[in-house]
Amino acid sequence: MKTGAVVCSMMLAVALSLHAQVTWDRLLNASAEPQNWLTHSGTVLGQRYSTLAEITPDNVKNLDLKWVFQARSFEKFEATPLVVDGVMYTVQAPNDIVALDAATGRVFWTYNYTPSTLARPCCGRVNRGVAIAGDTLVMGTIDARLIAVDAKNGKPLWNREIAKPGQGYAITHAPLVIKDRVIVGVAGGEFGIRGFIAAYNVATGKEMWRFYTIPGKGEPGHESWPGDSWQTGGASVWVTGTYDAALNLTYWGIGNPGPDWNGDSREGDNLYSDSVVALDADTGKMKWHYQFTPHDEFDYDATQVPVLADVEYQGRPRKVVMTANRNGLYYVLDRTNGQFLTGKPFTKVTWMSGFDRNGRPIRVPGQEPTREGTRVYPSNQGATNWYSPSYSPHTGLFYIPAWDDTWSIYVKAEEPYTEGQRFTAGMHRSSFALNRGIQNNTRSPEDGHGAVIAVDGTTGEKKWQFNFIDVTDSGVLTTATDLLFSGNREEYFFALDARTGLMLWKSALGGAIANGPMTYAVNGKQYVAVAAGNSLYAFGLR
Amino acid sequence: MRVGVPGVIVVLLLAVSAGPLFAQQHNYTPGDIEEGGRLYRINCIGCHGPEGNLVTGIDLGRNRFRRVSSDEEIVDAIMNGVPGTGMPPNAITRLRSFNVVAYLRNMNATSGVRSVAAASGDAARGKALFEGKGACNSCHRVFGAGSRSGPDLSEAGLLLRAIEVETSILDPDASTSTASPPFRAVKKDGTVISGLLLNQDMFTVQILDANGALASIARSDLRESGLLKSSPMPSYRDKFTPQELADVIAYVGSLRGAEGQ
């Protein structure tokens, strides 16, 4: 082949990759094109880890702000953007999709959607991102719809009601694309919904399967809900799951049972609330589950990203799922069968004292909500929550955005179910608010604090901890150069040495960070993007 | 004199015996009342005032309402507002609205239990005591005069009940949980810094210092720092007579911001 022909074919290949559709093969092998960020957590494994290596511990101090996108919205900015061949897609809360030039921040187009006034998301009119398949972007909405738009021009392709917003259903997480289908779950655990995860055809929006997170009559696990409590038991889904192609299993964390703080009407384990479930991606049939907090009365949703990795566990290779749970413990499970391998507290935990031989937590007597109120660690907001963790295969460490030593006083009450109304049967009194708002931080150290905690991925042994004064709603990103990026309510975006926890760089962004940082490259130049307050910031080397 | 704004109420209400004081309809716990007080200060105090009697014809602490009487009716008014009146809907859950009712039902039971009931105060005499015998303005500022080292009391009458002011004067340690708690730090060179904590993060601390200056201090310059465990304000229990105390309380209660002058 002549040189000219080689150049031509290379140019053609580059041109094709610049404008290629995002095929399932590309999504499945997203780690092979680290310049792009094709799914919510970077890859379907959920590690939020990138092999991009231009930014290193040595030069990270030279990070500069490259552009800012100011959302035309005052809602909390929780979305992690996608980047596809130089184009960034993000969500301007609650449910506008924006396409930007990933190198300059200039807007290509905006798709505006006004959710129904019936929408009643529990904890803010938020969205955590879109999914892409082919040239189709898919977004869940706070009025429980799934909307597909053309990635080239933002024109709507289909718009489907998934559930009734007036009954408290909503969708706040980024969908997960597997093959020809997009998978979402429903939020609304504080409104007496019956949770489910379902798959929809990307091209048409037609439902392909549905898995109820609370088993119906005659199904295994139904006996864990007395009477009709299963019909209003919550078990919502509001953080994106993960996928193992070899096993063809998709893994999802399930939310708390309802009513939240008084379990008297739902005596039993309340399956599959506070569990991770492994579902066949083609049929939605459950292969296994593990329940982190049976009969939860503390709002300890298990919706955290179930992170997948192949590791060496006690001397032999093991396919595992790793997760840091809102209940204060770090877990490692065998993801082929759900076998419990590791469970270890990463902060102060008073509701349980250990595990039985089956990996079931042993409850501490007296640590339950009462009419007068009971102080329990961790707090209602959890020792961690929806903000994405990271696992670095390079360090073997799992990085937890944590609320350390925070507590709540849990109060139970009587509250009948009324359709569309909050159904919590109690409350909590905590030193930390759900959302920071404009409050200054004058709290005392006894109220707890935020941190990034690094634990050994297989044993859960704590390796280092970087403490904040305030708490955090920021996810964590790690890279192959052993950099860790995260933020907090103190409005700093920063880089740590992923091996030691030493701070290497920081920037004060003037708004609390409540989303997961991500990284991408355009024309060989690496960027790191994060939202703070109502704006999205992109940094690169000077 | 240093008056905590407005932390005292929490301690005071928790000290109240719960059962006999409660309204007949619900058995509220001390925690319900405490939470209700917190919510009242955030959502209600602006119109109804600290004593619950600033809206004509309504005295929340004495169960005097215009259109409602039962706990459920009050909860409905809190959540949905009262059409045709200035009462707006509030974004408070039903259970937490009952906490507000718990607070309202116990407001009267927690006032007038000490010297406030013993003598009616005179605000003019109280002002003289505030600036004279009490030297309260050596720490507190009112309408631009006085030190800034303690909380500014120019709007104290809009925020604090008389019983809360009294408790702050007699038992200052019961009222240290203010929005700007007293803070103390020691720099690496031994310099002691004190003031009111305004904000903080991993790297800096923002205070209003004892000289009345807004200061931002790098944590890296500090050898130690933290909130004071007890109030720097002395008790006036043995310094004021009951009548003088009532006069000072009347004066502080008359402070309703610049527009109230």
Image (spheres, grey):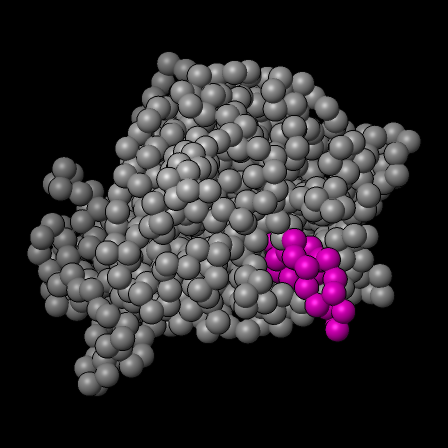
Q: How many marks?
A: 0
A133 or A120, which lies in front? A133
Quick check: is A257 in the magenta stretch?
Answer: no
Write the residue at 9% across / 53% down: B144
Q: Nearer the viewer, residue A372 or A120?
A: A120
Query: At 70% from the left edge and 44% from the top edge, which residue is drawn?
Result: A245
Res. A401 visible in picture: yes
* Residue projecting furthest to the right: A218
Percent across and percent down for residue A322 are 66, 57
Residues rendered magenta in the picture: A308-332
Q: Which x, y percent locates residue A41?
A: 53, 46
Q: Is residue A47 left or right of residue B164?
A: right
Q: Residue furthest left?
A: B145
Q: Nearer the viewer, residue B223 or B45?
A: B223
Residue A148 point in image, percent of width and height: 53, 22
Q: Quadrant of residue A224?
A: top right
**Residue A391 sits above or below residue A257 on the image:** below
Could you tell whether A329 is left or right of A82 in the image?
A: right
Is B256 in front, or is A309?
A309
Instruction: Give x and y (percent) for residue B211.
Output: 12, 68
The answer to whether any part of residue A94 appears in the image is no
The relative height of residue A43 versus residue A183 in the rendered view (above or below) is: below
User: Which residue is at the far bottom?
Assistant: B190
Name which quarter of the figure residue A29 lies in. Answer: top right
Question: Which image quadrant is residue A97 in?
Answer: top left
Q: Is residue A345 left or right of residue A523?
A: right
